[in-house]
Image (cartoon, grey):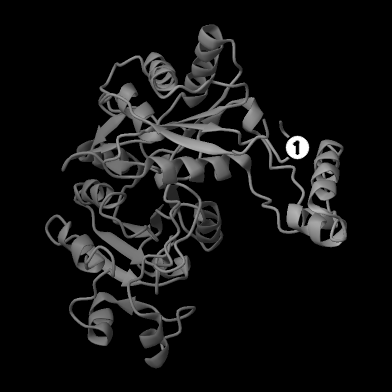
Amino acid sequence: MKRTVGTTSRGIRAPIIKQGDNLVNIVVESVLQSAKMEKYQINDRDVIGVTESLVARAQGNYASISDIAADVNQKFTGDFAVVFPILSRNRFSSILKGLAMTGKKIYLFLTYPSDEVGNHLMDIDVMDELGINPYTDVLSEEKYRSLFGEKVVHPFTGVDYVKMYKDLAAKDNIEIYLANDPREVLRYTKEILVANIHERHRTKQILLKAGAEKVYGLDEILTEPINGSGYNPQYGLLGSNLATDTTIKLFPRDCDIFVHQTQQLIKEKTGKHVEVMIYGDGAFKDPRGKIWELADPVVSPAYTKGLEGTPNEIKLKYIADNEFHDLNEEEAEILMREKIKTKDSKIINEAATLGTTPRQITDLLGSLCDLTSGSGDKGTPIVLVQGYFDNYATE
């Protein structure tokens, strides 16, 4: 019978995970139980995605805001600047609480008109009307308020982030500025904590070149335990989330071990060779809200070998319009399948690839998994993707 389905993505329900749980067993049993109940088969090259929060929770990879303060106090001797954090109650507010607990004066610099992932502090059209040059102008909090009003709220969350961050101060030790040149912070201090995510390496380089004396990034805070806390040796505080009023959940560590153990256990139980990945935020942008979803340092902190690289595809509609446009449906289908079967193992710079997606497989799959599982109460932190590596020629 002719195949009628290509890629499918299933959100798999799982129990509430607690510290110390054997997550490998739970993930495998959840997938196999779903297959049995819903009457489908596990196949070679299926992909199992597990959200990073599940892995971190099973590890107990948590830290308190006092742990953050202790580590920062070890690294900075005097007042320090924090440059270019994102605007987020979930991602940065708890970190800022910890920074404020140091008791040091904090010069908090926010980018404008939006943060790194697209959350706006102002209406860009109003900014233009006021003649503000975002490349050169530095706005104090007072100047910002005089220009844009006492309450400037985010269109989706309804939060005034400047006020929220200011209110996290301990004894009024946070001073806020809006700027886009990180070198502006050197007017106030030469000790700097770089808080942006995807441009952090460039920001650090600019500051060091300009004369900064101490420069750390969020990826260098809590890279090892503080008073028995959780930690992440590669990403530090990047990828962390609010857990409680005084604790954060860190990005998971030892992820390679988890994905390979899960792959092996599926092999033992089914005889099938699946691929496994851990995923966090998807790598996509909301065209209406202008917000880029990716607030984690990477989409996938670990994945099995079969997920390396980029897709190797040809564009069906290009072939249909250029090579097979004079053929009837049956002839075109036969030749299309043959062309796909005989394509090179790695197609580079051919017209037939125009319009295909030159992104990492893990970024594409991670985005699919993130959209499938959602970020709320769906209860499906495991995702099974089937048929992703199939194509029109697969029977």
- The amino acid type, in three-letter code, at marker 1 is Ala
**Residue 100, how many percent across, how many down?**
21, 52
Q: Quadrant of the C terminus?
A: top right
**Could you tell me which residue is drawn at 45 percent across and 71 percent down?**
180
Q: Residues within 10 Å of mark 1 (few under 14, many from 20)?
A: some
In which image quadrant can residue 177 be found? bottom left
Residue located at (28% from left, 44% from top): 376
The percent position of residue 36, horizontal first and vertical second, equals 42, 17
Q: Which residue is mark 1?
A: 393
Estimate the x, y position of residue 372 in percent, counting from the top left.
Answer: 42, 42
Residue closest to the eye, 358 or 174? 358
- Closer to the camera in the image, 378 or 175: 378
Q: Is residue 254 above or below residue 193?
A: above
Q: Residue at x 67, y 52 (%)?
A: 357
Q: Residue furthest left?
A: 171
Write down the quadrant of residue 55 in the picture: top left
